[in-house]
Image (tube, rainbow, N blue to C red):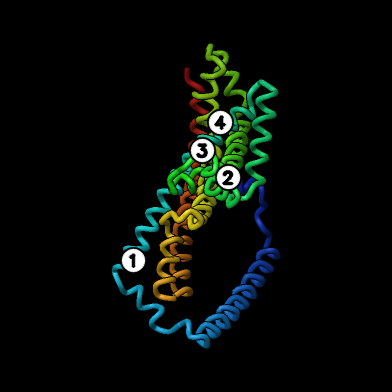
Amino acid sequence: MRDARTNIRDALYEEPGPITKRYTAVGTAISLAALAVLAAAVVRQFYINGQLAPRYWTIFFRWTTWRFLGQGLLGTLRAAAMAGVVTFILGFILMTGRICNYRILRLIATAIIDFVRGVPTLLFIYFFFLVLPQLGIRLDAFWKVTLPVGISACGVVAEVLRSGVNAVPIGQKEAAYSLGMRETGIFLKVVFPQAIRYVIPALISELVIVVKDTTFAYVVNFPDLMQNAKVLISNYDAMLSVYLVVAVIYILINFLLNRLSDTIAKQRPRTLAAAELKGPTA
């Protein structure tokens, strides 16, 4: 049984020695100093160009501004949540095709995975926005965002799920066979639940990418955070201040998701160790 205190980072990276730690500290200090100088130069240039004038920033003392941004944030979260559901469902279907016993299905699933991983998200959105209406298929702006974003990310999720399935010890399947379980039941009740535990942090990290990809919603005029930000910019001519506030909001969302991923990754070894001790159940 694996050490419950070991996680994926321990397996991939060695603990740095004292010399490496000193070099890292020096490099970090130099980098921070360089970034501070660069930030000061940027702020000075903004001041010279008048971008720090109060009229560009006082709009954030109005409740209507934050309400409008909040409405856009809700749109972003709705789109990201639905795109995440689409991504997981399609990723699960492609993963099952990738590991099935039929060669033709494996080839089809592999080709689809390679295709969606190689095509930019924006091209999928343009396809749903420009091509489908010409074919008589008209979708709401919400689906013109969520479906392309979900399709774009499903290939990566399929490979993440497949790696989790392959990481489940073969002894788990053998024990399930010995209990008289069938192939489908073994996969759904024994293998896949354990595979999910392995890859939850990676799935959350992919959700961060999904959230960022929803910023393409402006193409289809879906009222998300970025679209509402563009409206504020056009009304108040405050590009720097609005984009800066919106960037902070996106950073906070992704920071919270990354912290959630780290928390689950730290708790996961204990959960996996307990699952291994318990073994499969019929």
104 lies left or right of 225: right
Mark 2 lies on a secondary structure that is: helix
Evaluate if marks 2 and 3 touch, with contact meaning CB atoms under 8 Å apart.
no
- Dot 4 or dot 2: first in sequence order is 4
- The numbered dot on residue 152 is 2
> What residue does disc 3 label?
88
> What residue does disc 1 label?
66
Residue at 43%, 54% in the rendered image? 222
- Identified by mark 1, the residue type is Trp
> What residue does disc 4 label?
93
- Dot 3 or dot 4: first in sequence order is 3
- Cα gap from disc 2 to disc 1, whole angstroms: 31 Å
- Dot 2 or dot 1: first in sequence order is 1
- Cα gap from disc 1 to disc 4, whole angstroms: 40 Å
Evaluate if marks 1 and 3 touch, with contact meaning CB atoms under 8 Å apart.
no
The answer to whether residue 42 is visible is yes
Which percent across, then down, holds residue 52? 45, 82
Evaluate if marks 4 and 2 touch, with contact meaning CB atoms under 8 Å apart.
no
Mark 1 lies on a secondary structure that is: helix
Mark 3 lies on a secondary structure that is: helix
- Identified by mark 3, the residue type is Phe
- Identified by mark 4, the residue type is Ile
Which percent across, then down, holds residue 138? 47, 42
